[in-house]
Image: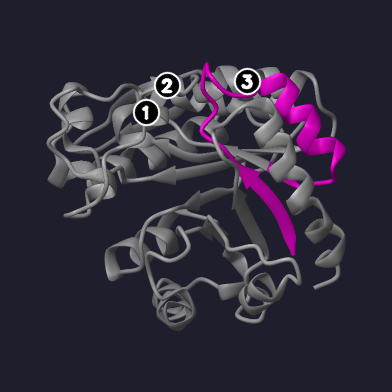
């Protein structure tokens, strides 16, 4: 099992270059950064879109730009896999985003995993002129257009939300046909349909859904789309880490090959101490 870590990289915690070096030195496979462009003060959407959720932590409004931070980490590490966990695709321009992902993949020599999600913050989306109920369809078309840009010398896409005339765009990603695309959405027929159509993996957040019982449903969706279940990786964000690794072993037993452990957005000392706590799991689970 691959063990990675994730953190809200902000201006008040350990900075990306120092963090990337520390994560790689301890042998972790990957580092994942989430994103939010901004957090409107109105705060009408509850945290995570869940009614009754606690107040939204300050770190959500303080995140570094994902691709700037990951590019800095790429330039100062050698082996560390760089994950977007997740990119809010619906809120981004797909033409620019395709170039950002491809550029990062070239700069890092093929170390990128493109984690994507639908998003939950309605007022954040509204400022990007995105209708909340259309976010899934918008994400789908933007990803399909990006795949055309990554894989074609002359790319073209015509849809309801994206209209790309025949165009040139380089660089192309080092990874072929493109960096792995993993969807972080919750379990359900629409999510699994999207994974089957245009993704390479599923990585939900631990604890929000009954993961183990949903894997069979995902495999059913893959078969219906004519895809081999082996073509889709399974991972978990926010995986629970116990000193004996038992919780992670239980995930491995249902086919999970990547567990991403959460780091606090705290002081550098606090973050490094948590890394040191997690580090023994890397060796413990490398042959699981």
Identify the residue position indicated by label 3 in the image.
Answer: 171
Mark 3 vs mark 1: in front = 1
Mark 2 vs mark 1: in front = 1
Q: Position of residue 134 (x, y in %)?
A: 16, 44
Q: Quadrant of residue 153?
A: top right
Confirm whether the magenta stretch covers residue 177. no
Answer yes or no: is residue 274 visible.
yes
Badge number at residue 62? 2
Whether residue 165 sits left or right of residue 98 in the image: it is left
Confirm whether the magenta stretch covers residue 9. yes
Vertical order, 89 against 172 (above or below): below
Q: How is the image coloured?
A: one colour
Q: Position of residue 45 (x, y in %)?
A: 16, 40
Q: Residues within 10 Å of mark 2 (few under 14, many from 20)?
A: some
User: Disc 2 versus disc 3: distance between alpha carbons?
Assistant: 30 Å
**Quarter of the N terminus within the rendering:** bottom right
Q: Residues within 10 Å of mark 1 (few under 14, many from 20)?
A: few
Residue range (magenta): 1-30
Badge number at residue 58? 1
């Amino acid at each position: 099992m691959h063990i990675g870590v994730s953190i809200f990289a902000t201006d008040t915690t350990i900075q990306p270059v120092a963090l990337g070096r520390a994560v790689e030195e301890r042998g972790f496979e990957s580092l994942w950064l989430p994103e939010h462009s901004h957090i409107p003060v109105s705060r009408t959407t509850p945290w995570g879109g869940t009614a009754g959720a606690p107040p939204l932590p300050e770190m959500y409004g303080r995140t570094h730009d994902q691709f700037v931070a990951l590019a800095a980490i790429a330039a100062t590490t050698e082996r560390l896999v760089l994950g977007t966990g997740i990119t809010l695709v619906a809120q981004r321009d797909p033409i620019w985003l395709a170039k950002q992902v491809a550029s990062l993949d070239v700069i890092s020599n093929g170390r990128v995993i493109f984690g994507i999600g639908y998003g939950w913050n309605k007022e954040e989306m509204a400022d990007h002129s995105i209708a909340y109920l259309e976010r899934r369809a918008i994400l789908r078309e933007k990803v399909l257009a990006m795949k055309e840009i990554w894989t074609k010398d002359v790319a073209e896409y015509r849809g309801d939300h994206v209209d790309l005339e025949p165009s040139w765009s380089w660089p192309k990603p080092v990874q072929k046909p493109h960096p792995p695309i993993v969807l972080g959405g919750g379990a359900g027929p629409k999510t699994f349909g999207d994974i089957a159509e245009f993704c390479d993996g599923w990585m939900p957040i631990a604890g929000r859904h009954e993961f183990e019982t949903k894997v069979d449903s995902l495999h059913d969706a893959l078969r219906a789309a004519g895809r081999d279940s082996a073509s889709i990786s399974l991972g978990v964000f926010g995986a629970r880490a116990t000193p004996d690794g038992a919780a992670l072993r239980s995930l491995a037993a249902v086919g999970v090959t990547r567990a991403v452990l959460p780091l606090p957005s705290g002081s550098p000392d606090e973050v490094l101490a948590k890394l040191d706590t997690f580090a023994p799991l890397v060796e413990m689970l490398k042959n699981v």
